[in-house]
Amino acid sequence: MPSEVITERGKTLFDVSAGICFSAGRWYGGFSAMHLAQPYLTSSQNETNRLRRLFTVNAGGEIPVRQGKLLIRPHAALLTQHDRLIIQSGLSVSYRELLLGLSVWNIRSGFFVVEPSAGWKTGIVTFTISYNYNIAGNYDYLQGAAIVKAGVKISVNNVEKRKPVHIINIPEL
């Protein structure tokens, strides 16, 4: 079986992604296509080492309850890459500064993950921590895996998104 020498030097690869997001009121949806260039991750140019295209469709929204003090945010996504189909759905709830969420991931092969999360929001900064745990499915892929993620999100609100377009009509001659 051939092998490769892995060096400490990094490698820069060209890749392209594109996406679009639509929103109306408190609801949103979008589509993205990632890894359009499908770069090879190693110098061997072997097809098994190629980063396949990833297509994503997602949707979600925000439902205010109790005069907006409690926000319920359902969301769902469908991802497909090569021969993998991944379904993700979840719900997050925020009350004042506290955030709680629960997401479920299912890969067509039977791999099933539950991801609870918690967070705290202060003004424009949100701190979150989530814990992923593989509870069923292909244990050869990630045996009893648990992944802890922490994140910081900075939100900029009240940004003017509309740009006026000036059209000059040229009279016909």
Image (cartoon, rainbow, N blue to C red):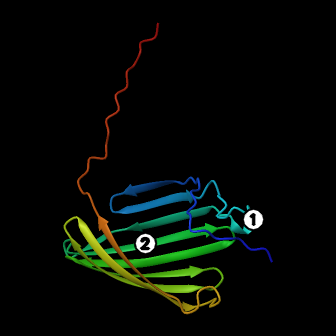
Q: Which residue is the site of mark 1?
A: 46
The x, y position of residue 90, in whole percent, is 43, 78
Mark 1 Cα-neighbour bin, 10 Å: few <14, some 14–19, many ≥20: few
**Image coords of residue 5 (percent x, y):** 68, 71
Residue 69 shown left or right of residue 86 in the figure: left
At x 58%, y 75%, the residue is 86
Residue at 69% in and 71% down: 83
Residue drawn at x 47%, y 77% as measured from the top left? 89
Rendered image: mark on residue 75: 2
Amino acid type at mark 2: His
At which x and y percent is residue 50? 68, 64
Give 19 or 127, whichever is nearer the viewer.
127
Residue 112: percent from left, percent from top? 56, 86
- The front one of 57 and 140 is 140
Residue type at mark 1? Asn
How busy is the neighbourhood of tag 2: few (under 14 within 10 Å), some, or many (20 plus)?
Answer: some
